[in-house]
Amino acid sequence: MAPPRVCVTGGGGYIASWLVKLLLSRGYAVHATVRDPCDQKNAHLMQLDGAAESLSLFKADVLDRAALAAAVEGCQGVFHVASPVPADKTVDPESEIMVPAVKGTLNILEVCSSLKVQKVVVVSSTAAVHSNPNWPQGKPKDESCWSDRKICMEKEGVLMC
């Protein structure tokens, strides 16, 4: 019997890489999307235990539905981890961060719906919970913690919110 197949978007990122490693260790076949499968920054993925047999890298951008569909085809589940992460302050946060993040999420959800994917997990950015000065120090952040909108507006364009 073939192992269950799942897709991880943004497979070359820090969190996604650990997720790929965990999924491989649990016997899943993994389709991971990356911007460029030949880029050396993704080489570590193919060195993971089980990668040679069970990991396929797909060139995909979250704004390209056809590329996403190719990666998701045949998968029972999808972990949507990909999101724009600019290194510096952006000139236009709306078009450089928000539009790709929202449209990319809509694209993956539409692709999953059309391909009848059984389970989808959408992973949020730490930015969603990072800037909350009222959160008790030392308390783990969870789904009830959200960044303060006023602080986010003051830090406009900085990857904090």
Image: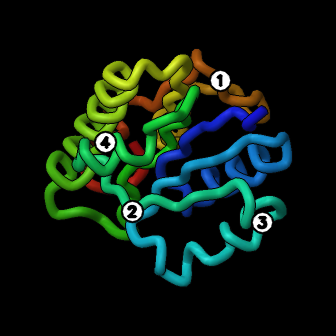
Looking at the picture, does residue 136 appear above or below residue 39?
above
* Mark-to-mark CA distance, 2 and 3: 19 Å
**Mark 2 / mark 3, whichever is N-terminal:** 3
Question: Is the C terminus in the top left, top right, bottom left or bottom right quadrant?
Answer: top left
Q: What label sits on residue 142 in the rendered view?
A: 1
Q: Tag 3's secondary structure?
A: loop
At label 2, the amino acid type is Lys
**Camera-side mark, 4 or 3:** 3
Q: Which element type, helix, strand or loop, lies under badge 1?
A: loop
> Going from the N terminus, do you reach mark 4 or mark 3 first?
3
Q: Residue at x 37, y 39 (%)?
A: 151
Tag 2 residue = 59
Mark 4 vs mark 2: which is more N-terminal? 2
Give the number of the mark in front: 3 or 1: 3
Question: Which residue carries the number 4 mark?
Answer: 101
Q: Secondary structure at mark 4?
A: helix
What amino acid type should be assigned to the residue bearing mark 4? Answer: Ala
Between the C-alphas of marks 3 and 1, the distance is 30 Å
**Horizontal and vertical percent position of residue 47:** 75, 73
Q: CA distance from mark 4 to mark 1?
A: 21 Å
**Which x, y percent locates residue 35?**
39, 65
Examine the rendering and report whether any part of residue 123 can be seen.
no
**What residue is shown with label 3?**
48
Position of residue 62 in the picture relative to residue 29 (left or right): left
Quarter of the picture containing the N terminus is top right
Residue drawn at point x = 48 percent, y = 47 percent: 9
Residue contact at pointers 2 and 3, CB within 8 angstroms = no
